[in-house]
Each structure stands twice: as structure tokens, then as C-alpha cells.
Amino acid sequence: MNGERAPQPGLDRLPHLVEATVRAGIPIDLSRPELAILTHLANVSPAVDLSAYRIVQEALSNVMRHAPGARTKITLSLDDENLLILVVNGPSAEPPSPLEGTGTGHGLIGMRERVRLVGGTVDVGPLPDGGFRVAARLPLLPKGSGTA
């Protein structure tokens, strides 16, 4: 098989994802760690790096689908052992189209599965103001990578 394989996206591609989403009409505030912390993030496993990117990607897709134009804040931070991802959007700035207003929920199921595979946790749900929150905690060292 001679097919070319593109590298999987990771946190280094996050600014491009945010830029594309802003161009699509979603105002985003991205809060990232300082350079020293980003250097530490460079050491996360490829699985955690990809999972983090995909979680933010799915959260932003859901904002576009279910809360068009909603102000959105993405926060990445670290604690001693985890990458913390928080994506919070406000209520929709415009009504979703009838075809887009309902969904299968497969994106959230996939998000939960990604998080589970790397040994993390995720909490998702609506907010009292009509917005939505995705909070994920991904281990900097993937599940089963402890030292012997």
C-alpha cells in the first residue's frame, strides 16, 4: 500500500482551528499557557495531543451547529499531572437552523471515548444562561505509561 499518510493534528494546530472557526462567524477567546508550559506540552504523548485537538474541534463544531455566533472561550492549562481543556460558549447569537438544531450526540460520545482511551475525564453539559461547557482532564502521561 503506497498511500501517503498525513500527520495527525495536535495542539500545535489549535491556532489554525481557532482562526478557521472565527472566520466561520464564531467569536473565540483562546487562553493558552505561557511558553514554558507550552514547551512542557510538547512532551505529551501523541494520543493525548490528538485527543486534546479533537476535543476542542468537536466542541467548536457543536458551537457552530447548535449555537451559531455564540461567544466562545477556550482555556488550556496544566496541573501537576494533567492537561486541562475548558471550552465554554454562551447562548446562540442567532437561532440554529431547524435541520441543525437536533443532533445524534455521536460527537459527544466520540469525545468521551477519546478521553477514556487516554485515561482522562470529561464533563459536558448545558449552562443556566443557555450556553454549553466542555471540560476535559487529560493525563500528561497516557494510561499505562508509568515507570517500572
Image (cartoon, grey):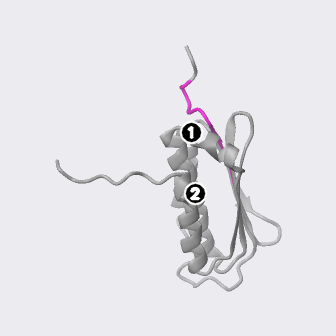
**Residue 89 counted in the magenta span:** no
Tell which residue pokes out farthest to the top in this image: 148
Residue 146 vs 74, above or below: the answer is above
Report whether residue 77 is seen: yes
Residue 112 image position (x, y, % from top left): 58, 48
Residue at 52% x, 38% y: name it. Answer: 45
Q: Name the residue at the right extreme.
A: 128
Q: Residue at x 57, y 79 (%)?
A: 23
- Residue 44's tag is 1
Task: Give yes or no for contact between labels 2 and 1 (Cβ–Cβ under 8 Å).
Answer: no
Q: Residue 107: percent from the left, percent from the top?
A: 53, 60
Classify mark 2: helix, strand or loop.
Answer: helix
Mark 1 burial class by Cα count in 10 Å: few <14, some 14-19, many 20+: some
Residue at the left extreme?
Answer: 1
Read off the magenta span.
134-145
Q: Amino acid at mark 2?
A: Leu
How much space separates mark 2 and mark 1, taking CA atoms? 23 Å
Residue 77 vs 87, above or below: the answer is above
Please determine whether, in this image, residue 123 is positioned above or below residue 42: below
Q: Which quadrant: the C terminus?
A: top right
Q: Which of the numbered marks, if any, corresponds to residue 130? A: none
Q: Secondary structure at mark 1?
A: loop
- 60 and 78: which one is in front? 78
Q: Is residue 101 visible?
A: no
Q: Which residue is mark 2?
A: 108
At label 1, the amino acid type is Val
- x then y, percent, for residue 2: 17, 50
Nearest to the eye among marks 2 and 1: give it: 1
N-terminal of the pair, mark 2 or mark 1, is 1
Counting labels gives 2
